[in-house]
Amino acid sequence: MTDYSQALPQWSQKRLNFNAINRIALQELPSLVRRWAPGGRVVGREYIARNPIRNDRQPGSFKVNLATGKWADFATGDKGGDVVSLAAYLNGLGQGEAARMLAEKLGIADV
């Protein structure tokens, strides 16, 4: 297994503050889900879209609560409770990798 830790920004080798990353990412969640799952629509507090990682024919079973970050694909049973878990799920990453990706994308340093 290759060690990529030397290629990561120095802050990413520190312990991650998942709560801070989730709190900041939640503020950007509407734009994030539009990029991650394009073509969806907002209904009330939820973003409803096709699940981009499976052959989802129509929107309806994949939902993200824009106020809390909780998400679920009711067709498969996949679900999570925050933006980091959603990023991990949609990008095929572990939780730590997803947190680092979000922190970098959102310009968060030292969290």
Image: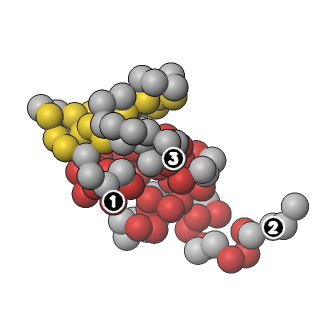
Question: 10 Å neighbourhood of mark 3: few (<14), some, or many (≥20)?
Answer: few
Instruction: Kindly identify which residue carries mark 1.
Output: 35
Tag in front: 3 or 2: 3
Q: Is residue 4 left or right of residue 21?
A: right
Q: Residue furthest left?
A: 44
Question: 10 Å neighbourhood of mark 2: few (<14), some, or many (≥20)?
Answer: few
Instruction: Kindly identify which residue carries mark 2.
Output: 3
Name the kind of residue labelled 2 in the image: Asp
Name the kind of residue labelled 3 in the image: Ile
For the point 61% across and 51% down, the residue is 93
For the point 43% across and 29% down, the residue is 73
Name the kind of residue labelled 1 in the image: Arg
Circle 3 SS class: loop
Quadrant of the image occupied by residue 108: bottom left
Place of residue 45 in the rendered image (x, y in percent of width and height, measured from the top left): 16, 33
Q: CA distance from mark 2 to mark 1?
A: 29 Å
For marks 2 and 1, the one nearer the N-term is: 2
The quadrant of the picture occupied by the C terminus is bottom left
The quadrant of the picture occupied by the N terminus is bottom right
For marks 3 and 2, the one nearer the N-term is: 2
Residue 53 numbered tag: 3
